[in-house]
């Protein structure tokens, strides 16, 4: 294949993104203002007595005040005597694979329960639910082509003791987090044949509850601050949308929620301590699992403010006898500016000393901008990142990709088999972007995403630029089945073009 020069294409894609996100939505907003001056079509239907409405945006508009009704009109505050049925079609209750006790989201008489010595009422019920994924996929990275049939089973068990206490476990019996899978390998030929990674590993197992509910006698009138939540066991810790940390570790966390101050409508703070099963670094060592024991101390806080935004702050310290000690800090703000949804994040890793292969020193900046186009549920987004020096996450599971895995579909791992990430290379001293358009077809039953992305090194002596185009289509069949199609074409500086194509069938139960 022809080798390509990427950097000019990457710069052009950035200009296209600026036009797409800022100019087009602004014009659409102006057009929407003109349209809103006209009577609403959906409101006209309501007035005519037509109450059968399809799902999606029209169903949401069903509850909006009819256009032209003044807020100070007393008639608009009165309840109508006319019976208007709910516009959406009745959905059958989702039935899990196994349920014992009161039916999940069901109706009928609730079992009386059992009173504990602390005076708490327990009403146990047990669920087994999950997802089965099966895909045929081909991935060519420019040097080697991989064709395989891969399978994954996510099995969840949930023992609810009450509305706030539960025991949860999670298994992946057909594959692991480090790249193994169960299925058939067609290429490369030297490893073709049946593959299996059957296992009985408990990936997660933890208990969570609330002290005020376990010991109701501490506060019979519910007027004191005993609503303290906690969890203990092997569980996923995901901070800053997975950038600062995204790993399954043995830990305990204690949370105080619903704190109110001047200018803050809700503040949640959590203290945590982890001690085992920690994977340090950014998964730069592909398919190698490096979990070990550490002392991980953390503090996280999230607040809804009077400025109509949500702020978060996370602080971690890792004391590691097998690797370098380090501090990790992350902060974010999520808000809406007129028609523009936005999230801004800054994360830093600060090792004690010179660092190591899995513990680096650096700052990672992220910007996520999106807009829901007028009169539709379709979304256009423009996400960018900048890594200064060598930022590393505090810990990442081997199947979670790089710290910018959530930037777009070109950066995200598939999560099964050996299908690669088009732009998922290490991000040291790198700037990158993902520009996408997500549309909904057939109401909300089908989803189509188109994305273009690029990345380049900020160091003049490194030719690591890359650009890619990807697409994803998903369609639901009934309430349990999903068809998913993925494809991409990508190129790295002075390398052969890479491509991927996959078809997946997903069953939710």
Image: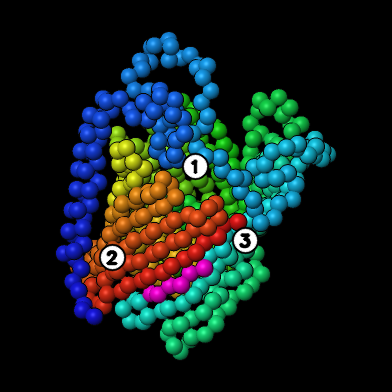
Q: In this figure, which residue is indicated by the disc labeled 1?
A: 301
381 displayed left or right of 51: left
Q: Nearer the viewer, mark 1 or mark 3?
A: 3
Q: Is residue 227 above or below residue 129?
A: above
Q: Residue at x 26, y 65 (%)?
A: 467
Identify the element where label 2 is drawn: strand
Q: Magenta part mainly helix, strand or loop?
A: strand
Q: CA distance from mark 2 to mark 3?
A: 34 Å
Q: CA distance from mark 1 to mark 3?
A: 31 Å
Check disc 1: other Cα within 10 Å, few if <14, some if 14-19, many if 20+.
some
Return the mark for residue 468. 2
The stretch in magenta equals 134-139
Identify the element where label 1 is drawn: strand
Image location of residue 139, percent across then percent down: 38, 74
Q: Is residue 127 above or below residue 324?
A: above
Return the mark for residue 359. none
289 displayed left or right of 393: right
Q: Residue at x 24, y 80 (%)?
A: 1
Q: Residue at x 69, y 55 (%)?
A: 98
Identify the element where label 3 is drawn: strand
Q: State how many labels appear.
A: 3
Q: In this figure, which residue is indicated by the disc labeled 3?
A: 155
Image location of residue 307, percent across then percent down: 37, 30
Q: Nearer the viewer, residue 462 or 61?
A: 61
Q: Residue at x 18, y 53 (%)?
A: 15
Q: Nearer the viewer, residue 214 or 129?
A: 129
């Amino acid at each position: 294949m022809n080798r390509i020069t990427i950097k000019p294409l990457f710069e052009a894609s950035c200009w296209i993104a600026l036009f797409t996100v800022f100019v087009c939505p602004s014009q659409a907003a102006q057009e929407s203002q003109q349209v809103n001056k006209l009577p609403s079509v959906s409101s006209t239907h309501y007035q005519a007595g037509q109450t059968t409405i399809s799902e999606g945006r029209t169903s949401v508009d069903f509850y909006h005040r009819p256009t032209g009704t003044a807020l100070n009109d007393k008639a608009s505050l009165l309840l109508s005597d006319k019976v208007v049925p709910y516009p959406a079609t009745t959905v059958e209750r989702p039935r899990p694979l196994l349920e014992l006790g009161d039916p999940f989201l069901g109706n009928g008489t609730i079992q009386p329960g059992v009173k504990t010595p602390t005076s708490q009422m327990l009403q146990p019920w047990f669920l087994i639910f999950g997802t089965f994924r099966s895909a045929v996929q081909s991935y060519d990275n420019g040097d080697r082509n991989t064709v395989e049939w891969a399978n994954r089973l996510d099995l969840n068990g949930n023992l609810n003791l009450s509305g706030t206490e539960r025991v949860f476990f999670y298994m992946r019996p057909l594959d692991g987090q480090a790249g193994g899978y169960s299925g058939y390998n067609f290429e490369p030929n030297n490893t073709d044949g049946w593959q299996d990674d059957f296992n009985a590993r408990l990936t997660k197992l933890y208990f969570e509850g609330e002290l005020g509910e376990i010991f109701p006698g501490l506060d019979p009138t519910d007027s004191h601050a005993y609503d303290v939540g906690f969890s203990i066991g092997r569980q996923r810790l995901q901070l800053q949308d997975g950038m600062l940390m995204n790993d399954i570790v043995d830990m305990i966390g204690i949370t105080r929620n619903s704190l109110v101050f001047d200018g803050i409508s809700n503040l949640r703070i959590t203290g945590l301590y982890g001690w085992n099963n920690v994977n340090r670094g950014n998964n730069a060592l592909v398919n190698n699992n490096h979990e070990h024991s550490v002392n991980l101390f953390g503090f996280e806080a999230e607040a809804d403010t009077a400025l109509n935004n949500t702020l978060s702050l996370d602080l971690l310290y890792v004391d590691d006898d097998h690797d370098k000690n380090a501090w990790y800090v992350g902060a974010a703000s999520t808000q809406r500016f007129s028609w523009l949804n936005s999230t801004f994040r800054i994360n830093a890793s600060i090792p004690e000393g010179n660092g190591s292969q899995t513990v680096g020193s650096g700052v990672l900046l992220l910007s996520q901008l999106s807009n829901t186009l007028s009169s539709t549920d379709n979304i256009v987004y423009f996400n960018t990142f900048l890594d200064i020096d060598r930022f590393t996450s505090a810990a990442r599971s081997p199947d979670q990709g790089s710290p910018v895995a959530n930037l777009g579909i070109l950066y995200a791992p598939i999560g099964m088999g050996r299908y690669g990430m088009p732009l998922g290379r290490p991000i040291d001293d790198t700037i990158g972007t993902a520009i996408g358009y997500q549309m909904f077809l057939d109401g909300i039953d089908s989803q189509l995403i188109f994305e273009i992305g690029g990345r380049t090194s900020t160091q003049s002596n490194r030719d690591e630029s890359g650009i890619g185009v990807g697409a994803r289509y998903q369609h639901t069949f009934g309430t349990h089945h999903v068809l998913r199609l993925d494809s991409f074409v990508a190129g790295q500086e002075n390398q052969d073009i890479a491509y991927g194509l996959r078809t997946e069938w997903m069953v939710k139960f």
